[in-house]
Image: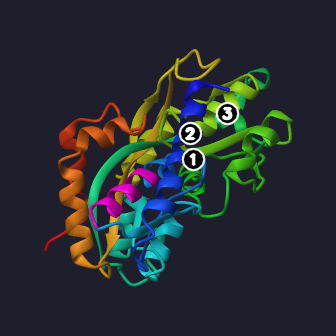
């Protein structure tokens, strides 16, 4: 078991224990919509939950596992959660009633609190299968995780620019089962929209010999042109076992938002608390380590919180 994985598990145990025993002083429960238990959103959510609780007299805070941005935005709109992680492009589309949300009323009742890390569209294959580029997935068995997950949204947007002779067969598998199903040969490729380093990618690459797939550069250019939220980026080698070459892919910024129904005093206290602890926030998770201090509270895509 890698040191990264051990540290991740230990942090969950410690923080969850602290949440259960230290924050039981209030009946009000604040809920944060995150992502998969093995996703970066969840681990960062544990830290932000602790900040919300500490800044609001020990109010109880729970991190809610979800399928990702779309479910988080839906739950936020229904007032079933109070805060949420989401990809910036999907949040902006929801706010304006565009793209995937064009059939729905614009969701104006949310505001942005933090900029976070980039989420990379990550395609993992086995070394022996010789799948080198995205177009090589023709006729292969793939998995994007749960329906309407961030990875499935990105895959559909990208696949629209490919003319597969045999469309890849999409097999629904929970992210938590990726490592076993993939390494046992039941699927040829797994896809995630995730930050790096990532606990699930770490598990997969330790369990069986794996590699990242590069996205064809001309297809990236088309995607970026028609979907401005995406950017061309490099998945760098060396972060995981067996990943020895850089690969081109796309990424989208992740953000932390709040619903307008949340008590403004709770949000105000949280913002004041986190604004003077940016360095602590950065050091709390590998996904945030390399971000500049100014990054977290500048250049927002949504309206900011106002008292």
Badge 3 vs badge 2, beta-carbon distance below 8 Å? no
Which label is found at residue 101? none
Is residue 168 rendered to the left or right of residue 216?
A: right
Q: Which residue is mark 3?
A: 203
- Residue drawn where x is 23% and y is 35% of the image: 292
Q: How far across and how far down the image is residue 270, in percent? A: 25, 62
Question: Which circle's residue, 1 or 3, is located before the other in the chain?
Answer: 1
Q: CA distance from mark 2 to mark 1?
A: 5 Å
Q: Residues within 10 Å of mark 1 (few under 14, many from 20)?
A: few
- Residue drawn where x is 17% and y is 48% of the image: 276
Quadrant into which the N terminus falls: top right
Above or below, 69 relative to 280: below
Above or below, 14 relative to 76: above
SS at mark 1 in the image: helix
Task: Please say whether residue 298 is visible from this viewpoint.
Answer: no
Badge 2 vs badge 1, beta-carbon distance below 8 Å? yes
Which label is found at residue 13? 1
Is residue 196 rendered to the left or right of residue 126?
A: left
SS at mark 3 in the image: helix
Residue at the outermost left position: 307
Q: How far across and how far down the image is residue 199, in percent? A: 58, 37
Of 139 and 6, nearer the camera is 6
Prevailing secondary structure class for the magenta stretch in the rendered image: helix
Q: How far across and how far down the image is residue 178, in percent? A: 73, 44
SS at mark 2 in the image: helix
Q: Which residue is mark 2?
A: 10
Question: Which circle's residue, 3 or 2, is located before the other in the chain?
Answer: 2
Q: Quadrant of residue 290?
A: top left
Question: Which region is colored magenta?
Answer: 46-56
Residue at the outermost top position: 244
Q: CA distance from mark 1 to mark 3?
A: 19 Å
Is residue 84 rendered to the left or right of residue 189?
A: left
């Amino acid at each position: 078991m890698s040191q990264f994985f051990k540290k991740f598990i230990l942090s969950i145990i410690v923080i969850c224990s602290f949440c259960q025993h230290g924050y039981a002083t209030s009946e009000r429960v604040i809920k944060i919509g995150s992502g998969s238990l093995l996703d970066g959103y969840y681990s960062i959510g544990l830290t932000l939950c602790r900040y919300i609780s500490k800044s609001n007299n020990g109010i109880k805070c729970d991190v809610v596992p979800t399928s990702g941005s779309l479910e988080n935005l839906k739950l936020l709109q229904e007032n079933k959660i109070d805060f949420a992680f989401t990809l910036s492009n999907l949040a902006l589309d929801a706010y304006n009633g565009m793209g995937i949300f064009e059939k729905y009323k614009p969701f104006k009742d949310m505001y942005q609190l933090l900029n976070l890390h980039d989420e990379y569209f990550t395609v993992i294959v086995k070394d022996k299968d010789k799948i080198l580029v995205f177009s090589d997935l023709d006729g292969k068995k793939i998995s994007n995780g749960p329906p309407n997950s961030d990875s499935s949204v990105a895959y559909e947007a990208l696949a629209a620019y490919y003319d597969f002779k045999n469309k890849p067969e999409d097999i629904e598998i929970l992210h938590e089962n990726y490592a076993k199903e993939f390494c046992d040969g039941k699927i040829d490729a797994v896809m995630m929209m995730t930050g790096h380093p990532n606990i699930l990618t770490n598990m997969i690459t330790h369990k069986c010999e794996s590699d990242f797939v590069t996205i064809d550069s001309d297809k990236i250019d088309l995607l970026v042109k028609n979907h401005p939220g995406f950017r061309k980026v490099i998945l760098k080698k060396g972060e995981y076992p067996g990943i020895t070459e850089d690969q081109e892919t796309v990424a989208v910024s992740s953000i932390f938002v709040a619903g307008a129904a949340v008590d403004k005093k709770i949000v105000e206290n949280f913002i004041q608390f986190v604004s003077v602890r940016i360095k602590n926030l950065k050091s709390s998770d590998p996904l945030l380590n390399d971000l500049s201090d100014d990054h977290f509270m500048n250049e927002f895509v949504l309206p900011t919180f106002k008292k």
